Structure formats: C-alpha cells, structure tokens
Image: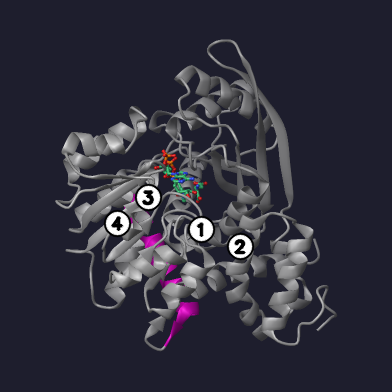
Amino acid sequence: MSKHLYGDYSTPEKFLQCFMAGLIKRNPGEVEFHQAVKEVAESVVPFMFEHKEYFSNLILERMTEPDRSVTFRVCWEDDQGNVHVNRGYRVQFNNAIGPYKGGLRFHPSVNLSILKFLGFEQQFKNSLTTLPMGAGKGGSDFNPKGKSNREIMRFCQAYMTELSKHIGENMDVPAGDIGVGAREISYMFGQYKRINDNFVGVLTGKGISFGGSLIRTEATGFGTVYFTQHMLNHIGDSIKGKRCVISGSGNVAQYAAKKIIELGGKVVALSDSGGYILDEDGIDSEKLEYVIDLKTNKRGRIEEYAQKYGVPFIANKRPWEVKCDLAFPCATQNELELEDAQILVKNGVMLVAEGANMPSTIDAIHYFKEHKVLFAPAKAANAGGVAISGLEMTQNSMRISWTSEEVDQRLQDIMKSIHDQCLKYGKNGEVVDYLKGANIAGFVKVADAMLAYGVV
Ligand code: NDP
Ligand code: 2IT
C-alpha cells in the first residue's frame, strides 16, 4: 500500500481520526458536511481496511471533494419593485456512475456546508437506486415563505438564467427539495426552455403534461414506507396497527402519511417549523387531503389543522415526545437529537425511518443502535424520490410515459433491491445494521467505477 496523505493509518480508528482531521482542516466551519462524511466514514473505513485498493487510490478523499461547486448572484424584483439579491449554488459532486443528479433547495438556511452534505449523501443514495445517476445538489438562501406566485416565478427565472449554463440532460439534472416543488420546477423548466430552445429532460419533477413522471410527487414518501415495510417483514411484522409519528408536513411527510394510512398504520402527529399537531384519533385520508391542500396549495401552517379538527397544537416543539411504534423524521437535517432519541426509546419506539436527509444526529443514531431500534438511514429510506427522477429521465429519453401502476411497481422493486443491498453488507447473524449496509453498498459501486477510470 502506498503512503497515505493523512498520516497514521495503522488501524481503522486511527485512520478515521486522521482522515476527519484533514477533512475538517480543508473544509473549515462546514459542520453539516463534516457530520455527513463522518457518518459514512465510520462504516466505510473498516471495510476499506479489508479492500486496500480503495485506500491506495484515495477513493474516500476523492469522494469527499466535489468535482466543482458553482456559486452565483441571483438578482430579482419583488411585487413592489424592490430589488433583492440572493446567492445561488450548484455543487456537482461526482459523475462516476451517471450525470450529476440531485435536488434544489430554497431555504434561508442554505449554505455551502448544507449543500455539500446533501451532495455527498446523494452519491451513496443514487448508487443504491441501481440507476445510472451521479450526484449533485443546489439551491439558494432565498426564502419562499410569504412570497407571491409572481415573485416565486421571477426568482426561479433569475436563478435558472445562471444555472442553465451549468446543467444539461446528460450532464446535470436537478430536481426539487425543500421549498422547491412542482410550481418552482415548472417555472425553472420554462425558463431553461426559453433560453436554450431545447425541450429535454434537464429537470425532473416536471408537470405530467410536459415530461413529468407519474408517481414522482408521491415517490419519496411512498418509498420510505415501502422500505419500512421490508424491514418489518424481515422480522415477521408489518405496518398494520402501528402508531406512527411523522415530522414535517411537506411533500415527503404527506406521502409517507398517505402510504402508512393505506397500509393500516395510524398517523397521530405531523409538524412544521411552528410546532406539531397531535390527533389521537389518527389522521385519516380525508384529513390528509386537507393537509395536502393546506400545505401545497394554500401554503398555510399546520396549526390550522388543530383549529379545523379541534386537536392540540404544540407550538415550537418537535413531535418526538409523542409515544409511537414507528417514527418518520421527514422535515430537515438534525431535527432528531440525542434527547429526542432518548425519549423515543423510553416510549418504546421500535423503528425510525429517515424520510428527510440526515435528520438524526450521529449521537441519536448511536443511541438507537445501542438500544436495538431498527434504523433506516436516509440514503436508503428516501431514495425512492430520486429513483423515480431517474425513471423520469428514462421516459424523457425514450419519449414515452409509463402508467402509475408501472412506475409504482418499479419503485417497489427498487426499494426491495435497496433493502437487499443493505442486508448483503449489513447483516450480522440475526441483526441488520442498515446504516452500515447502505453506506458500504452505496460506496462500492461508485468506488469501483472510479477505480476503473484510473487517476482522474
Ligand atoms: P417541503 O418543502 O415540501 O417540506 C419541508 C417540511 O419540513 C415543511 O413541513 C417544513 O416546515 C419543514 N421544515 C423545513 N425546514 C425546517 C426547519 N429548519 N425546522 C423545522 N421544520 C422544517 O420539503 P420536502 O418534503 O421535499 O423535504 C423534506 C426533507 O426530505 C428534506 O430533508 C429533503 O432533503 C428530503 N428529501 C426530499 C425529497 C423530495 O423528493 N422532495 C427526496 C429525498 C429527500 P415549514 O413549512 O414550516 O418550513
Ligand atoms: O434528496 C433527494 O434525493 C432529493 N431531493 C431528490 C433528488 C432528485 O433528483 O429527485
């Protein structure tokens, strides 16, 4: 083995320490990025000690350095004619196994650290889907809350005017994430088409009449629940009758709730950044339709559910204090910390499935493992969204559209395959370490492609 960049690599623990010190030094202050890398490195480094070719070719160092990060000024006018400036980003992380692929996030908290953590994670997730997709992430610190449709349109057009120089249907294909849904993708697709006069699948999550895939809207939430179903089936159990708590009430939370209800589970809580609602009778399909309309069309607050249905709204709190069998963090990063994990465990939680990206802190994940809580990491559990984005790209290339049934069947097959990959690398006797399984399975495919390319 050739000499390594980061000093002492005599044991996995020592190497991990040196590697993380180097990463932190090269990426100062990017705490979310450090966290995402550490979570993966804890599983992958011991595996690399058994497969030294990854070491000598510095594969982990290469996978933690994006191919490029583009930042740019986005200048737009509000309805009163005031001028605003935001920062736009696209981090193109890795295209070893396909075009850069990953969402765009519009949220005031967006910065390079958050986009690098998301782009880094996306490499493993996209690899797990079995589809040929590399990894990227982008967005802006623009805050869509309280903006009119025209303001959103002007912002999206301004953002795409610059982004369009950096993307392409075989090069980089963005999609939605927090604050970016069908409305924003449509405005951006319209602007891309206007600039390039080229009708191609350069974004996914498009409207159905202009190249979007059926089931893309539902895919992340549905996929998370399909994955959960496989985990429960593996231990001879099912979702039926389980009491479920979901955080968030956006795209992922809504369709996770829908699938849980369909499969006979009981959803008792949903949240947003203002707090959570607790509905002891369970959120049924009709109430969920109200939530979907409230959040997607009216852009209201979850507190309004409490007023409409006469249930408690607990302001400024996360829903993890509610007793449940299954917990689905579906809002944002680091929304489930050690204290939340402790209370969930105390209340008897049996499984946590991450619909959001990196919602659990590393301490919380370790606590779940120590207490034998089944844990579905984001890169496996929420891969259904990008998987159907991949199928949208396929349909666009073939210039055909598949039926809902066909796409849903493919989604189910992909989630099963991801579960199988987790078992392959994470099963140890009766116990399955899904985090380890997902990290290693995701890593191997990308790493082997990078090895095949030589030193590039
Ligand atoms: P949406 O914008 O549709 O919804 C986001 C939800 O999370 C809202 O309820 C929002 O509340 C809440 N939220 C956002 N930021 C915070 C915060 N800082 N604190 C508390 N609550 C917050 O986004 P999505 O549902 O699409 O995304 C949710 C998560 O799922 C993200 O982690 C995303 O990366 C991940 N994901 C999304 C995929 C997709 O296809 N959309 C695919 C895979 C993962 P409020 O309205 O009050 O801001
Ligand atoms: O985090 C994610 O996987 C997404 N936001 C979806 C990305 C995509 O390209 O569909």
The residue at which mark 4 appears reads as 245
Gap in angstroms between the C-alphas marked 2 and 1: 9 Å
Gap in angstroms between the C-alphas marked 3 and 2: 24 Å
Q: Earlier in the sequence, mark 1 or mark 4?
A: 4
Looking at the picture, does residue 114 appear above or below residue 51? above
Visible in this render: residue 290?
yes
Q: Earlier in the sequence, mark 4 or mark 2?
A: 2
The answer to which of 353 and 397 lies nearer the viewer is 353
How would you rate the neighbour count of disc 4 (Cα within 10 Å): few for under 14, some for 14-19, many for 20 or more?
many
Mark 4 or mark 3, whichever is nearer to me: 3
Q: Quadrant of residue 37?
A: bottom right
The residue at which mark 1 appears reads as 358
Residues under numbered marks 2 and 1 in contact, where contact means CB atoms less than 8 Å apart: yes
The answer to which of 163 and 140 lies nearer the viewer is 140
- At which x and y percent is residue 112? 67, 46
Q: Earlier in the sequence, mark 3 or mark 1?
A: 3
Helix, strand or loop status at disc 2: helix
Type of amino acid at the residue the image marks with label 2 = Gln
Q: Earlier in the sequence, mark 3 or mark 2?
A: 2
Residues under numbered marks 1 and 4 in contact, where contact means CB atoms less than 8 Å apart: no
The residue at which mark 3 appears reads as 317
Gap in angstroms between the C-alphas marked 4 and 2: 25 Å
